[in-house]
Image (spheres, rainbow, N blue to C red):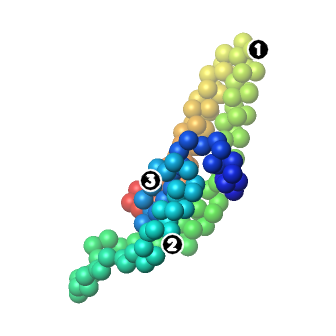
Amino acid sequence: THDRFMLDRLSTVVLGFDREQRGRLYADYRQWLAAQAEAPSQQPTPPATKKTGATPATKVAKLSYQQQRELSQIEDRIAEAEAAVTRLHESLAAAAARGDYKRLAAEGAELEAATAAVDALYRRWEALEALRSGKQA
């Protein structure tokens, strides 16, 4: 919070982070400030990495143009597919209310197919995002 007075008055414990991003519990904000002032001001040095002639074992794959285009359009496709599922649910409820069992069976099969299509779109979206971020799907 930005209100330090309120923080001191209301909180019983303050979780403060030091320069190494380690969290510690403090009694109040002033105690955290004192701990920050006492801490050495040097920045942590990153660990040295060995340089070898070998290439890394994992290679980050980039998305192809088609995959990028598919990823940019997939949210709209998912929204359309979910809207179709919603329409089918409403139509199915109306057919059930009318007692139209033949229509009910047909729309039930359509609903099942539409739901499977939505699930497939979500799986594809997840796979494309994993490729984009460099994680294995």
Foreground tag (1 vs 2): 2
Q: Which mark is residue 64?
A: 2
Q: Is residue 11 positioned above or below 62 on the image? A: above
Q: Is residue 106 positioned above or below 7 on the image? A: above
Label 3 vs label 1: CA separation?
64 Å
Is 73 or 55 nearer to us in this picture? 55
Residue at numbered disc 3: 24
Label 2 vs label 3: CA separation?
45 Å
Is 60 or 30 nearer to us in this picture? 30
Residue 10 pos. (x, y %): 64, 42
Is 22 or 80 nearer to us in this picture? 22
The quadrant in which residue 95 appears is: top right
Tag 3: amino acid: Arg
Q: Residue at x 23, y 85 (%)?
A: 52
Which quarter of the rendering shows the C terminus?
bottom left
Q: Is residue 110 left or right of residue 58?
A: right
Tag 1: amino acid: Arg
Q: Residue furthest top?
A: 99
Q: Which mark is residue 98?
A: 1
Q: Using the rendered image of the protein, determine whether residue 14 is visible from the camera's viewpoint.
A: yes
N-term mark: 1 or 2: 2
Q: Using the rendered image of the protein, determine whether residue 128 is visible from the camera's viewpoint.
A: no
Foreground tag (3 vs 1): 3
Q: Residue at x 46, y 76 (%)?
A: 41
Residue 116 pos. (x, y %): 54, 39
Is 63 or 11 nearer to us in this picture? 11
